[in-house]
Amino acid sequence: MAIILTIVISFCVFALIIWTLMQLRTPRFRMERAQFVRGLEDVIAGQADDNEWRVLTGYPMRHDPELERMRLRCLEIEEAEYTGRMPYLFTEAGIERLRSVREQLLTGGNQNNSTDN
């Protein structure tokens, strides 16, 4: 009888652990447009470091296709204009291009969509 009771209790504990693990969701980082714009403004103002830039551009924005296009543009700008030196991580031309990205986000992103595709 003790063996059956031990098996039943073990099964219940195991089932509870499996159910709990199935209910837990994987934490996801989700950046909104306002956060992205604020991060761009910090980079443009020379107040962001390399880690902040990596956080800003390192995660895909699957929840917002327009924001994902802007993130990819920022990565293109990084390839051409990134210096990595503080306080400004980009050349003057790079900062101007980042300002353009910021303006597109603030105005709804409807400008120059033909060059983003």
Image (tube, rainbow, N blue to C red):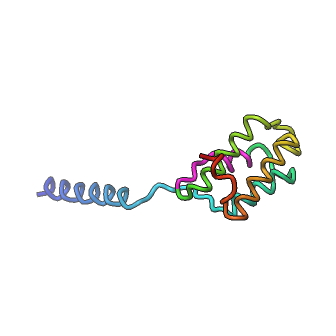
Q: Is residue 68 above or below residue 84?
A: below
In magenta segment, residue 57: yes
Q: Which residue sits furthest front?
A: 114
> In terms of depth relative to the viewer, which is nearer, 80 or 21?
80
From the viewer's perspective, tell me whether residue 95 is left or right of residue 69: right
Q: Residue at x 64, y 52 (%)?
A: 113
Q: Which residue sits furthest left?
A: 1
Overall secondary structure of the magenta section? helix
Residue 65 screen position, x and y as percent: 56, 55
Residue 91 screen position, x and y as percent: 86, 40
Q: Residue at x 67, y 64 (%)?
A: 108
Q: Residue at x 70, y 60 (%)?
A: 105
Residue 66 screen position, x and y as percent: 60, 56
> In terms of depth relative to the viewer, which is nearer, 18 or 26?
26
User: Which stretch is magenta?
Assistant: 52-62
Q: Is residue 8 above or below residue 98?
A: below
Q: Residue at x 73, y 46 (%)?
A: 53
| Number of numbered discs | 0
> In terms of depth relative to the viewer, which is nearer, 93 or 83?
93
In magenta segment, residue 12: no
Residue 85 screen position, x and y as percent: 86, 38
Quarter of the figure that contains the N terminus: bottom left
